[in-house]
Image: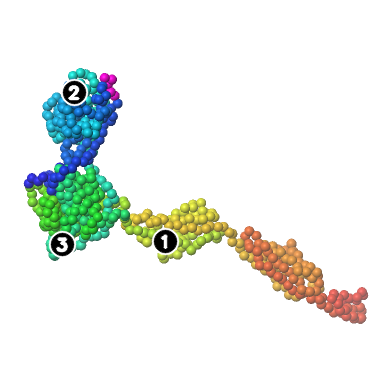
Amino acid sequence: MPLRVFRKVAKFAIIFFVFQTISISIPLKANAANKVWSTTTPLDVYNRPDLPTQYDILRVEVGLYDNDLDLVHFWIQFKNPLLPSQFNDGRDSWAGILIDSNGDDKEDFRVSTYSYTYSKNFGQNAFAGKWDGASRCNAVSWMDLEENSPYLGFKVSQKCLGFSNKFKVMGYSDYSANDNSSFDYAPDAFATIDLGDYYNPKPKVTTPVPFSSNSIGKQLSNYSNPPENLSNLVSELRDSVVTIECIVGETGGTGTGWAASVQMPEGRTSQTYLITNYHVISDCIYRGTVDVILNNKTKVVGTLAAWDPDNDLAGIYISTKLNPMTWQGVTPLQGGWAGVLGSPKGLPGVLTTGIVSSVDTNNVWITFTAPINPGNSGGPVFDSTGRVMAIATAKARDSEGFGIGNGVPLLCEVVIRCGQGQSGWSGVSAKISNDFPRKLQSIDLSTNLTTVNSAVRKTLAISFTPTIVGDITVRTTSGLIPELKSETPLICQVNSGTVNILSTGTCTIRADQSGSADYSPAPTARIFIGIYFTKILKTQVIQTDVVQDVFLSDKEVAIRIYATSNLEVQAKSDDYNTCSIFRDRTTYNEYVIILNDVGVCGINLSQVGNSDYSPAPDKYLSFEILPAEKKTITCFKGKIKKKVTAVNPKCPVGFKRK
């Protein structure tokens, strides 16, 4: 059936079918005129010597206004302000736009002045058509004399002239049409104009869009059954569905939107994020806002956050809090129950029901039998749990019960930043946002070491698990394995589970965890360990033979004195009058104590150590030197016997010891 639809809807209509579809939004009419697109040609760089300055033109501007996007506006910028009768001076003076429609740098169409006198800023009829006068179209030219403006304007229907979105233009002015002089071109060569810059909009995000949430629809054993209580379900969902109104000049209309369950980006004060079709809001892109009519009839302003013409989707922020609808869950099943809420014919909150008649997981759309009409565009197509499966987008022309819904995974392309496993339909992949707010994690990097003597320790053990004890322990709250590295590689280096100590200084170990699909990167953790070098000397002790008390008559005592390090022991007598000690150089570690007098012989023993051994504990050796013991011997001379008693008894002369 014939329906009046948006001017640009056909460009973005669903093309999944070979038969024709129509959009389902309602056109409205209002008055407005805003320039939504314009471009200028290069400046003119050459003038003829005979050109009057009043006819010197500089360049051409081309633009579009929102109240009628078919009317192409041209402005010729003159060097001087225009005069009312500048093109009605009796010399057939004229000016106009020369259009090259096929790119051969030759004039195909012309829009030019008639011999009229202009007044204030009122328009005059203008010529538009083939340069030879054929195929004429209605056109208007005007001056803004009240503002003393140097611009001469024209507007003409693109469709009427029949040139494409890409064409070439050149401005022209002529002081006298009947001579071959006193004329000017601007620019000096045809300049290319591409209206496709406006007519072929690209996906765009004007402000950070929200992230998908963890809200998942209930799983059912039988999706074909209708809701247990449809009235209660609709009562829960009704306030989440709104009417979107976009009126721009003579174009615009109404559609439907619904509040999506999302995570708002950091710093965003908006309370609700609405989803609708791109073709519902396309005429309002230039101004960035639409009117949103809530279920309670309240009208609020909606800010356009993002749009995706390729998938006919858009996102809108509003400051009013609405209950969000869940849109993630299982892939829709053919034959499953389906409901649609929307504003057909501008009547809000209308419910229709049916079934899911087909599912295409490759192109991500469904068809459904619930009736939809103009005004339903952008509304939710939901299952018996109230979870949104698709966005009502179009219907097959001249058919009822043949609605077309774009699947919610398409929201992840531009309109919502989706996380891993949050595509909208389970088992159907979707674009994953690189900046999705993953779960936070932290690193616990610790050690009980503040300093380490590298003379003792050359390596430090790293523990990554609670069951293993290490000099350095590292854990993450996510359970992900962190990466450790040294920030001071000349002092220490990390090799797998070990820190190798190389030199003295501060060893700085850092731990990083780059995150995963579920976790964001962890903040870097660091520990600092002072590395010094102090050689640990070996210990030694002095060992000696045991010396009992001796008699002075013994004269000397041989004794073994040594250090466990095998280093030479220094020995010194307390009193050389009593005894003295010397090392026997002929026998290793042998010393000789000379007994000089009766008394206590005290010997101080020491070993000062060296680069490998620490000094030995001093040792003191003492013993008593007793008076010489007298002995008695028997001496004979013939039959004469004589006893001699002395320390060193000797037989008298002539006597012999028996």
Observer-nearest residue: 203 or 357? 203
Q: Residue 216: image x %, image y %?
A: 23, 60
Say which of marks 3 and 2 sits in front. Answer: 2
Residue 210 lies left or right of residue 383; in this view the side is right
Q: Earlier in the sequence, mark 1 or mark 3?
A: 3
Relative to residue 481, is residue 195 drawn left or right?
left
**Which amino acid is tagged 1?**
Asp
| Disc 3: which residue | 235
Residue 357 at least partly seen: no
Residue position marked by numbered label 2 in the rendering? 89
- Percent of width and height locating residue 356: 13, 55
Q: Read off the magenta span.
A: 46-50
On the image, the x and y values in percent for residue 69 come to 17, 39
**Residue 48 falls inside the magenta stretch:** yes
Q: Secondary structure at mark 2?
A: loop
Q: What's the residue at 26%, 59% (across, down)?
A: 214
Label 1, on which residue? 444
Q: Are marks 3 and 2 in contact (CB under 8 Å)?
A: no
The nearer-to-camera label among 1 and 3 is 3
| Among numbered discs 3 and 2, the one appearing first in the sequence | 2
Main secondary structure type of the part rendered in magenta: loop
Is residue 37 part of the magenta span, yes or no? no
Which circle's residue, 2 or 1, is located before the other in the chain?
Answer: 2
Query: What secondary structure is found at the residue carrying circle 3?
Result: helix
Mark 1 and mark 3: span between their CA atoms? 49 Å
